[in-house]
Image: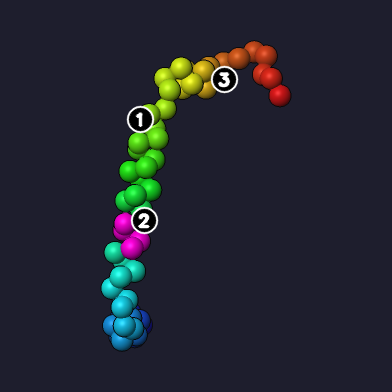
Amino acid sequence: MFEQIKHNMETIAGVAIYPILSLLIFFLFFVGLGLWVFSYKKEKIEEMSQIPLNDNPSL
C-alpha cells in the first residue's frame, strides 16, 4: 500500500515543496511562541499563578 502512495506522490509535480513549507510553518510557530513566552511580563505570570490559590474567585 505504501508503494502505491509513494508512486502517486512521486508523479505529482512540485510535491517536494509541501514538506519544506510545513517545516517552515511549524518552525516559525514555535519560534514565535518562544519569543512570546520569554517576553511575557513577570508580574502577569505571578498574578496568574496566584489564581488557583484565591479564596474569592471573581466571575
Mark 2: give few (<14), some (14-19) or many (20+) Cα within 10 Å.
Answer: few
Q: Could you tell me which secondary element the residue under label 3 belongs to?
A: helix
Instruction: Please name the residue shown 29% across and 64% down the image.
Output: 20
Contact (CB < 8 A) between labels 2 and 3? no
Instruction: Please name the residue shown 38% across and 48% down the image.
Output: 29
Q: What residue type is labelled 1?
A: Phe
Instruction: Please name the residue shown 35% across and 45% down the image.
Output: 30
Q: Does the magenta stretch include residue 5?
A: no
Q: Could you tell me which secondary element the residue under label 2 belongs to?
A: helix
Q: Does the magenta stretch include residue 22?
A: yes
Q: What residue type is labelled 3?
A: Ile
Outermost residue, top side: 55
Tell me the distance, in whole angstroms, between the alpha carbons under discs 2 and 3.
Answer: 34 Å
Contact (CB < 8 A) between labels 1 and 3? no
State which tag comes first along the sequence, 1 or 3: 1
The residue pinned by badge 2 equals 25
The residue pinned by badge 3 equals 51
- Position of 54 relative to 24 (above/below): above
In this rendering, the label closer to the viewer, 1 or 3: 1
Mark 3: give few (<14), some (14-19) or many (20+) Cα within 10 Å.
Answer: few
The residue pinned by badge 1 equals 38
